[in-house]
């Protein structure tokens, strides 16, 4: 299991996102006024300023927009990962999130821009919140 950092609460804007992660749901927001897709979780729509946002559940599939590979990270929670990817994923619902592509033998050669991926929720050694990561489909 991994030991990535956990969210710190109280944090009113992101708590519904993390409650979703506990249920295996990748949640995002949509503006009820202009219908813009909103991610990361916020109190107001960045397009129109409206505070009337609703939560939705993503199907969890998308494509790799771009990525990099971290070969060494001495931060607690990352030391044991070895080389790992940091990737932007474009979800099919129209939002982009930073995450990691996992489940590949070598992240320097086995990940590509445009690659299709699906979310999964990585349980952690410590803490109550699984972390959303992506695996090639
Ligand atoms: Zn809006």
Image (cartoon, rainbow, N blue to C red):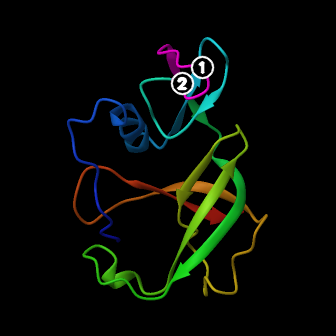
Q: Residue furthest right?
A: 114
Of residues 115 and 47, the one nearer the viewer is: 47
Could you classify mark 2 by the number of other residues whose Cα lies within 10 Å: few (under 14), some (14-19), or many (20 or more)? Answer: many
Residue 87 falls inside the magenta stretch:
no
Of residues 82 and 23, the one nearer the viewer is: 82
- Residue at horizontal 71 percent and vertical 60 percent from the top: 65
Instruction: Determine the main secondary structure of the stretch shown in magenta.
Output: loop
Q: Position of residue 102 (x, y in %)?
A: 55, 71
Q: Quadrant of the C terminus?
A: bottom right
Q: Position of residue 84 (x, y in %)?
A: 50, 79
SS at mark 2 in the image:
loop
Q: Position of residue 135 (x, y in %)?
A: 61, 65
**Quarter where residue 6 is shown:** bottom left
The number of numbered discs placed on residues in the rendered structure image is 2
Instruction: Please report contact status of discs 1 and 2: CB closer than 8 Å, yes or no.
Output: yes
Q: Could you say which disc has been placed on residue 48 in the image?
A: 1
- Residue at horizontal 69 percent and vertical 82 percent from the top: 110
SS at mark 1 in the image:
loop
Of residues 19 and 39, the one nearer the viewer is: 39
**Does residue 56 sit above or below 132 in this rendering?**
above
Task: Give the labeled residue for mark 2.
Answer: 45
Disc 2 under 8 Å from ligand 1? The reply is yes
Q: Is residue 129 left or right of residue 59?
A: left
The magenta span reads: 45-55
- Residue at horizontal 63 percent and vertical 30 percent from the top: 37
Q: Position of residue 21 (x, y in %)?
A: 42, 44
Q: Is residue 21 left or right of residue 57?
A: left
- Residue at horizontal 66 percent and vertical 25 percent from the top: 36
**Quarter where residue 112 is shown:** bottom right
Disc 1 under 8 Å from ligand 1? The reply is yes
Could you classify mark 1 by the number of other residues whose Cα lies within 10 Å: few (under 14), some (14-19), or many (20 or more)? Answer: few
């Amino acid at each position: 299991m991994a030991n990535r950092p956990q969210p710190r609460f109280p944090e009113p804007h992101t708590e519904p996102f993390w409650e979703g992660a506990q249920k295996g749901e990748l949640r995002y927001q949509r503006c009820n006024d202009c219908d813009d897709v909103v991610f990361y979780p916020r109190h107001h729509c960045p397009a129109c300023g409206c505070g009337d946002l609703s939560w939705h559940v993503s199907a969890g599939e998308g494509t790799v927009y771009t990525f990099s590979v971290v070969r060494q990270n001495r931060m607690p929670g990352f030391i044991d990962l070895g080389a790992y990817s940091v990737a932007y994923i474009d979800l099919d619902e129209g939002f982009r999130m930073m995450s990691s592509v996992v489940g590949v033998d070598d992240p320097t050669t086995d990940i590509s821009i445009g690659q299709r991926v699906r979310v999964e929720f990585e349980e952690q050694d410590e803490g109550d919140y699984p972390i959303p990561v992506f695996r090639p489909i």
